[in-house]
Amino acid sequence: MRILWSGLLALAVMAPVSGRTDERALYEAAKAEGQVIWYTTLIINVGVRPLAAAFERKYPGIQVRYSRADSAQTAVKVLNEARAGKVQADVVDGTDSLPPLRRAGLLARYRPAATDRYPPELKDPEGYWHATLIYFMTPAFNTRLVPKSEAPGTLQDLLDPKWKGKMAWTTSRGSGGPSFIGTVLQSRGEERGMAYLRALATQAIMNVNVAARALVEQCALGEYPIVLNIFNHHAAMSAAKGAPVDWIKLDMIGAPMQVSGLLKDAPHPNAGKLLLDFMASEEGQKILAQAELLPAMPGVPAAFPEVKPEVAGFKPVVLSQDLLARETDRWVGIYRSLFFR
């Protein structure tokens, strides 16, 4: 029996891209490693600790250690450690941190079985990453300042002169103006999209150097009647607490995602695979939903179900990892040239 089990452990270490490793064998191999190191962009108290605690309960003997930073900082950290020949992390996530790691040859191919339930646009066809969370970027409005019947519902409505000087967005690369610009160009095409953006630039949109969540709060306080390209679940969270704010199902809704992957030279590869399996599973996705994040797995309801497309009835413009890595700098350039005059 001991010989047979050692063979199963070897198979766990050499798991195929499909991820169809026997869970018990993978767990035993991961337990022998004792820990998994996760470089994450999630907020520690919101997503990381609940997920880590549930994983450790399910898989005793494996400690989850984590380090939190933004996507760009995470990518730089991994690249620097790899150049020094000291890869520290097993699992890494982010909204645009994985493409540079893939180009540098630092990612391993691993596809959790649960990702069979994910649509193609939420997983890498070669198995280097899969979505953990997805976000929906919409406008929000102060319901005391803007009657719901008058709130803009289309891109064209945003050009109405009555909204001039009454809209704001953040200066963040990952949301706000640059992300809105990218979504317009993806949905309308380059020529029509740029014509629309030039028209929108005449609306004197206010540029606010805060996070998208803070901008929703400022909208609720009445500082801005309408805010563009915020996370719709943030507006739903505020509304649930009684704030006078609501999100708009615009005719164009961008959807960036947070994705996760395994590092090629991970010091604890089996524990890394087991954590990725857990994060992608319905169980892990439900834990993220309970933390008021937006689970990527279709069919897993969010804490506020109405923010997801299958309930609200909209088709988002998915902003893939490769697209963000390739185009964000250009979108930032357009943003600065058109909206900082």
Image (cartoon, helix red, strand yellow):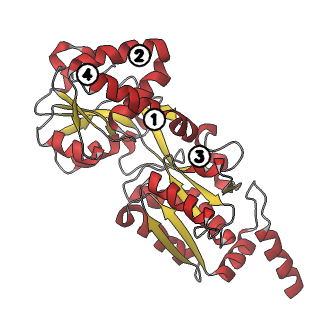
Instruction: Please identify the quadrant where the C terminus is shown.
Output: top left
Position of 321 relative to 273 (above/below): above
**Disc 2 designates what residue?**
194
> In this orientation, which residue lies closer to the viewer: 336 or 315?
336
> Which numbered disc flags the more N-terminal residue, 1 or 3?
3
Residue 158, visible in the rendered structure: no
> Which numbered disc flags the more N-terminal residue, 1 or 2?
2
The residue at the point 83 percent across, 81 percent down is 6
Q: Report helix, strand or loop for mark 1.
A: helix
Residue type highlighted by circle 3: Pro
Residue type highlighted by circle 2: Met
**Disc 4 designates what residue?**
152
> Which numbered disc flags the more N-terminal residue, 3 or 4?
3
Q: Is residue 168 left or right of residue 265?
A: left
The residue at the point 70 percent across, 56 percent down is 110
Residue 143, visible in the rendered structure: yes
> Which numbered disc flags the more N-terminal residue, 4 or 1?
4
> Which numbered disc flags the more N-terminal residue, 3 or 2?
3
Residue type highlighted by circle 4: Pro
Pair 3/4: label in front: 3
State the residue lying farthest toward the bottom: 2
Pair 2/4: label in front: 2
